[in-house]
Amino acid sequence: MVQKASTPVQAPMNPRDANLLAARNSGEQVPFNKKVHQQRSFSDWMVDIAIWVVLILVVLAVLYPLWFVVIASVSDPKLVASGQLSLLPKGPTLKGYETIFHDARIWHGYANTILYSVGGTLLNMVVTIPVAFALSRREFKARRLIMFLFTFTMFFGGGLIPSYLLYKQLGILNTAWVFILPGAVSVYNVIITRSFFDTSIPEELHDAAQIDGMSYIGYFIRIVVPLSSAIIAVIALYYFVGHWNDYFTGLIYITDMKKWPLQNVLQQILLANQTQSNIASVGAQQAQEAAEQIKYGIIIVSTLPLLVLYPFLQKYFNKGVMIGAIKG
Amino acid sequence: MKAKQVVVHENTPHGMRGIVWSFKRYWQLWLLALPAIFFVVLFAYVPMWGIQLAFRKFEPSKGITGGKWMGLSYFKQFFASPMFGNIMRNTISISLWTLVMGFIAPIILALLINQIASTKIKGLVQTITYMPHFISTVVIVAMLNIFLTPETGLLGKFLGDTSLLGEPQWFTPIYWISEVWQHCGWNCIIYLAALSSVDVALYEAAKIDGAGRMQLIRYVDIPTILPTCGVLLIMNMGSVLSVGFEKVFLMQNALNSSASEVISTYTYKIGILGSQFSYSTAIGLFNTLVNFFFLILANYISKRVSDTSIF
């Protein structure tokens, strides 16, 4: 294919190459045929090294800022401020976390966010999984129309003000419902789930169920759902993260601070610089440093639930997402 | 669809009779789809009805449909506004940079990750690069603020005595770089999925023909992911004028506002804070229409050029 003329490969494959091919195909790690690749091995080496250097840099660039937040949250704020922190915590202290634990605003926001996220995700699942199943049935001709109706909303919508007026009319402004109801269906997630049903549930199962006299709902509940734990986990994660990180809804539709979710509380503390007032008495410089440490701690505390869930769901990403992604 | 069609359904009735027939025959499927249809109609289609606000004067007592017909006057007001040029420039520059960089970076990362032979290391690299995707926008912007703080910040200490977030010319780069940092790993999943479908024999054949590492990437990997790239590019084109509201809004401050006011933040300020409902709706509609136009255009071009399209 490439630079064919200069390579000493004979036209009919020699037995050695054939053996090599067979061995490699059966999954064995066979060192490369040196004779054939002598000329290229040096440049391949360089490419290899370059790839590894870039990958290591990428991983460090992603990991280090996150790690820095972790170690800064438990280090002496003075040392953090003077830039002495590099790889490990210095002058370990849990003072920052202590302050956070005594800040009622954060716990209030936490409780609200848990309510909105759990409630919202439950409704999301109850609505999304059934419709995705219905849309995956090929004999259901109306699915094309419904799909079009859904997909259209991905690219066209009423916009901010008409939505705001609608919510006002429905009376869900300033209530928990505004976090739960409007986002009940994510068309993107419906598409992913539908492609999972399309590709991963064998059609023979439906044939067998039909012969046994099972209805669609029976088949869905007793056969399809139990076989779909991978996609259910992934979709639930998507929805949950969406609710957990939602800042927009609180900003636009909630004026009562008691109902604020965590993200809006975070914005006040982290960005509007309203850390607790009692620190201010300790002196400006110290207060500033303490406030910075609290910020690092709050970042950890607010992201913790997702980081805890993450390893458990990790194994589903490749299974669930990829199947959905290829077709979606 | 062609291969799997069941013989029983060949004589499907059409038109009104077809709908009634479908309800009767598939009432259980309709039942399963009903809650989702209800929510989509209520929360996506009903607000579309409210778009007429863009052409009417909003009077609270008369509701959405009762106000006086104003034609295109709110659109003209926007185009004539002194803010118009600046807002459009900011919106386009932020979204184009993000679109292009956010499109290229995951492709490169996926090609690199795909070169790792050990599945364990591959998994580790993926796990690490996915992580930032789950961090909230508020936290990301807070991290930017902390890291860019002059003198004490992780990056700020190397960057002089004013924060880059206060400098208009740095707004767009900070925006897209942090965006790539956060989502690059996650967005490369789809390419890795496509790459995992390459037949090993193809690599072997190319190697025996004398292809080196770079040539395997150039002649096997890249052609494999090209269709996926096309579809994703079209999808991205549909959002050419929609910069994420949250992040821009949170990154905004008095110093950088000349570079950070975009359409979505402007509609928020005009509409929600300023209560000019009609004017705000008109700007929002203009935004949606431009996006829609770009989506159709990208889809059309892609269909002509490479036979890839999303509809």
Image (cartoon, grey):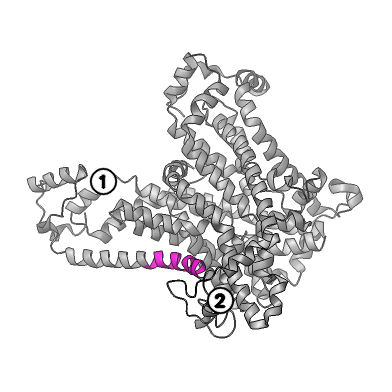
Q: Position of residue B127 (x, y in %)?
A: 42, 55
Residue A242 appearing in the image? yes
Q: Could you confirm whether marks 2 and 1 are on the same chain? A: no
Nearer the observer: mark 2 or 1; the answer is 2
Q: Quarter of the image holding residue A256?
A: bottom right
Any mark on residue A77, and which?
Answer: 2
Q: Position of residue B60 (x, y in %)?
A: 89, 52
Distance, label 2 to label 1, CA atoms, is 53 Å
Any mark on residue B200, and which?
Answer: 1
Q: Which residues make up the magenta segment?
A: A57-71
Q: Position of residue A180 (x, y in %)?
A: 68, 44
Task: Tell which subunit mark 1 falls on.
Answer: B
| Kind of residue at badge 1 | Val
Q: At 50% across and 77% down in the image, what residue appears?
A: B155
Would residue B245 appear left or right of B56 to someone viewing this image?
Answer: left
| Kind of residue at badge 2 | Pro
Task: Tell which subunit mark 2 falls on.
Answer: A
